[in-house]
Amino acid sequence: MNHQAGRHFLQIPGPTNTPLAVLAAIARPTIDHRGPEFGKLGREVLSGVRTIFKTANPVVIYPASGTGAWEAALVNTLSAGDKVLMFETGWFATLWNRMATRLGVVPEFIKGDWRSGVTADAIEARLREDRTHEIKAVAVVHNETSTGVTSDIAAVRRAIDSAGHPALLLVDTISSLGSIDYRHDEWGVDVTVGGSQKGLMLPPGLSFNAVSDKALAVSKAARLPRSFWDWEDMLASNEKGYFPYTPSTNLLQGLKVAIEMLHAEGLDNVFRRHQRAAEATRRAIRHWGFEIQCANEDEYSSSLTAVRLPDGHSADALRSEILARCNMSLGNGLGPLADKVFRIGHLGDFHDLMVTGTLSGVEIGLKACGVPYRAGGVEAATNYLAGNAGPLAEAA
Ligand SMILES: *Cc1c(COP(=O)(O)O)cnc(C)c1O
């Protein structure tokens, strides 16, 4: 057996580090998912999770990864041949687009540069052209995990409204929910897609659809084949806290604790903690002399940062070296960014020491790999964190 001493640093942008209290809840014995104890748990998590999406409407919970909830959002709202307007923010937007094609709908992909977010104006312009309302949905990614770019969802809502277009708004929040402020109801989102293993601090295996009244109404006439993903069966069972098939009982036990933890800290404090970690990380990166993949300051992601390495240097070699030396995993570049960028996850359950520890690991790797950098990035981050009191210090 090969043993690496010290705690593993899981600094990929999801799955994230699972707090011990959540792991302990998951480790409790599995209970009867048709029994009274489960009904209570089901009602608690089904109502608790709404506060994270900021919705008064139902949130459907699937025993699946986030990809399953993408599929659920499409098959419950669309029929074969329907047009869907999507925006190429990066790899995850591209995968959702590919899924739409496979399912028999017709996505139209507004081209992006993988360095910036959704342009609401482009969406508005396209919707204005669509006078016969062939486009049935606009589907965008809130936080593009391949690039570290966050899009303005409220602006997308305004664009749809200014165009006077009835399309549904579908939003992927898999890597932003619980890390970056998100408001399903206030922003008029019709289906919000979430996952358990990023800001919610759970292992992979749960995913979510928050559903507006309009989306529910549209789903009655939507004709894409669906069975496992059907909202109707789910919502009928959910009324009493149960599920139409066996739910991920233990993960739901963990979800209950994760929701409690987020509220104990306070969602606004959670978001501020993520902003601080992100800013500290960017200060280190700039000091080192590297470019941040996200081109616009107002679109910087609070949950991860993608770093461009200088030409001629392999991001994958750097990540391997860091894993071998420091027992730390960093995110790889996806699609066309493979080997050109690495991604630092700063989301979920972490504090300042984990931020500076992560950055130290990067600096060790840079030196070991002979990548030219300006020393002192960790210090730049440390100075920022020391001078910028966190939520706990503010509360004290
Ligand atoms: C992680 C992620 C996904 C994919 O979720 P899985 O749980 O891997 O299926 C989709 N979209 C975004 C934005 C993600 O970050």
Image: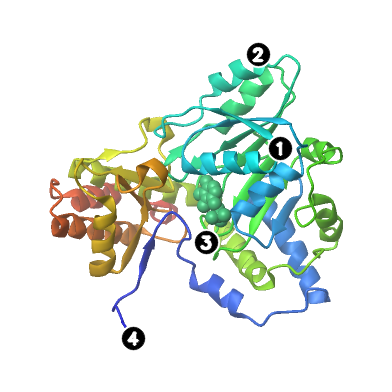
Whichever of labels 4 and 2 marks the residue nearer the N terminus, that label is: 4
The residue indicated by pointer 1 is 190
Residue type at numbered disc 1: Asp
* Residue for point 62% across, 64% down: 255
* Residue for point 13% across, 47% down: 372
Label disc, if present, on residue 129 of the rendered structure: 2
- Would residue 333 be found to the left or right of residue 135 on screen? left
Whichever of labels 4 and 3 marks the residue nearer the N terminus, that label is: 4
**Mark 1: secondary structure:** loop
Q: How many marks?
A: 4
* Residue for point 82% across, 54% down: 235
Q: Is mark 3 within 8 Å of ligand 1?
A: no
Viewer-nearest of discs 1 and 3: 1
Q: Position of residue 355 (x, y in %)?
A: 32, 57
* Residue for point 72% across, 27% down: 167
Whichever of labels 1 and 2 marks the residue nearer the N terminus, that label is: 2
CB within 8 Å, label 2 to label 3: no
- Would residue 383 be found to the left or right of residue 161 on screen? left
Q: Is mark 2 within 8 Å of ligand 1?
A: no
Residue type at numbered disc 2: Glu
